Image (cartoon, rainbow, N blue to C red):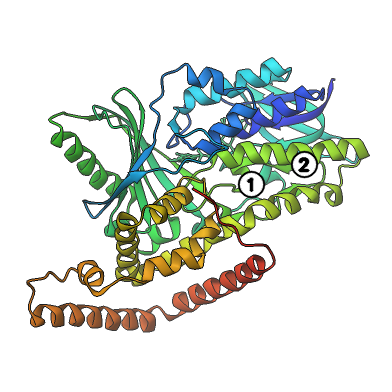
Amino acid sequence: MKIHDVIVIGAGPAGSAMATHLAQEGYSVLLLEKGVFPRDKVCGDFVSPKGLFYLEKLGCYEEIAQRGYTPIQRVSVHLNGSQLYEGALPRLPSYLPFAHAIPRNELDEILFRRAQKAGAVTIEGCQVLGFHTTPRMVNVEAQEGRRKRRFVGRVIVGADGANSVVARFADLAMNDARYIFPSIRGYCRGLASTEAILFVDEDFFPGFGWIFPVRGDLSNVGVGMVKETLSKHHISVKDFFKKFEIFVKSLAKRTGKAVEIEAPKGWAIKSYGGARQNYFERGLLIGEAACFVDPISGEGIPLALESAELGFETLQMAFDRGDFSVNTLSTYERRWRERWDPDLKVSDLVVSLIRNRYLLKFWIQSFRVMGMTALRDENYALKIGGIMAGLVPNREGFSPDIVLKSLLHGPSFWMEAFNIGKHDTVLDTLRCGVDWFNWELDVFRHLVSDYEWFQAWASEVNEKQSDLYQLLSNIPPRSTQI
Ligand SMILES: Cc1cc2nc3c(=O)[nH]c(=O)nc-3n(C[C@H](O)[C@H](O)[C@H](O)COP(=O)(O)OP(=O)(O)OC[C@H]3O[C@@H](n4cnc5c(N)ncnc54)[C@H](O)[C@@H]3O)c2cc1C
């Protein structure tokens, strides 16, 4: 039986990118995929300029450029059914000045063919059932049609996504409901928009809906929300999609068109907050199998491609040393933490905060204030938009510049933010004050009735923010020039 240098499980973006890197450098790679290309993968399909940068590095962009995807250069944000913000995405010199939404049945096939061209041996329709490690090898068991198969390699890479079998067999699977986001996606015909549209609704917060234009009048539409919140507050992600569908149809109506939304499909996202050890004797996890998804934007494609690169560099070192022990492979975790912790821990902290739905009114108000500030200050808008699109490091969201700009406004701004019009009387203003007072009483009532949860939430937030404070005080601050 042939002994492969590396067996990669899963041919999503992470697995195909890893197989390409390895094959290009002359390693013998076997890439096993349970689907048969072209195959669908439930996703928002949004590939940010950073994602396009990594696709270009792999030599896949030329083909993408020929397929006529809509260049996405603008974004609009809707809060509770009204448009809160509309503006341009930032342009950074090292990236293309637009994003694309690339259906995964197309993107993943392009990446898969790239790996084949680089020399990876591939088997489609081959589902990996498990593996075990011996002192010198890794044995992989799989099912291809009715046939049971066995493969042998020196190293295994789990690139098999959110429900990773490799993570499960390595005893590293993450199942914490705080870091899992059940999501639903459908394709929609009839909206000829060229901007990304984000939809936030307080009934389904913290979560958001998206419309990403693919090409022509085809868009990818969907919603996602934190699993812990869904079960704790008895909210259904299907109901979220239904409400979102009404919004999508209302957008089409404004332009006199009718839309058709296909039956949506669901899948869960595993986010960075749940990322922990993802190396083991003779193996690594990459991409979403390792929970590499930005918790705020839900973007996992750029991180899948980047983690393939980081994992590949670690494997190269391990092959040079002839040592695949956990000690050598732990370099991988050191590298990805150095690169991502300062930003993705910011996203994770933000999601941890807003997971507290008892403080909903406060979060929605803060979101409104940010949207209104963005409308008044272009640089602020570009920074926040850049953070959402993965272009500006997330830590810049906590920079004094952004925090002060969010807070330092004149009285007329605050009156508008709190819905107090010029013609409102003192009584109206008092009514607004009473509303907030009642809300505070409500929060207090919840604090008493759900004390254990509140306490766990507060200590989680406290731990995360002091960890982040330490981390950020040990590295130089960043300020992206836009
Ligand atoms: C609804 C939704 C919307 C999203 N929107 C976006 C977005 O707009 N932009 C973005 O960047 N990210 C988005 N994401 C996240 C993104 O889809 C993932 O992070 C990304 O696909 C991760 O890539 P991957 O290669 O690690 O895993 P995957 O893309 O999940 O690929 C895993 C591969 O492994 C194969 N596989 C699984 N198990 C086995 C097995 N046992 N044997 C063999 N093969 C196996 C699968 O068939 C698949 O091909 C979204 C996710 C969801 C669920």
Name the spot of residue 96 as percent of width and height, x first.
Answer: 51, 33
Residue at the spot x=41%, y=53% of the render? Answer: 379
Q: Is residue 394 visible?
A: yes
The kind of secondary structure element at disc 1 is helix
Residue at the spot x=40%, y=66% of the render? Answer: 405
Q: Is residue 38 visible?
A: no
Name the spot of residue 160 as percent of width and height, x first.
Answer: 62, 36
Name the spot of residue 350 as percent of width and height, x first.
Answer: 47, 63
The kind of secondary structure element at disc 2 is strand
Residue 28 relative to residue 168: left or right: right
**Residue 437 sits above or below residue 292 on the image:** below
**Residue 138 sits above or below residue 296 on the image:** above
- Mark 1–mark 2 distance (CA, rounded to whole Å): 12 Å
The residue under label 2 is: 283
Q: Is mark 1 within 8 Å of ligand 1?
A: yes
Residue 436 relative to residue 55: left or right: left
**Image quarter for residue 313?**
top right
The residue under label 1 is: 290
Pick whichever, 188 or 182, lies toward us.
188
Residue at the spot x=35%, y=43% of the render? Answer: 75
Q: Quadrant of the N terminus?
A: top right
Task: Say whether disc 1 or disc 2 marks the residue closer to the N-terminus.
Answer: 2
Pick whichever, 89 or 17, lies toward us.
89
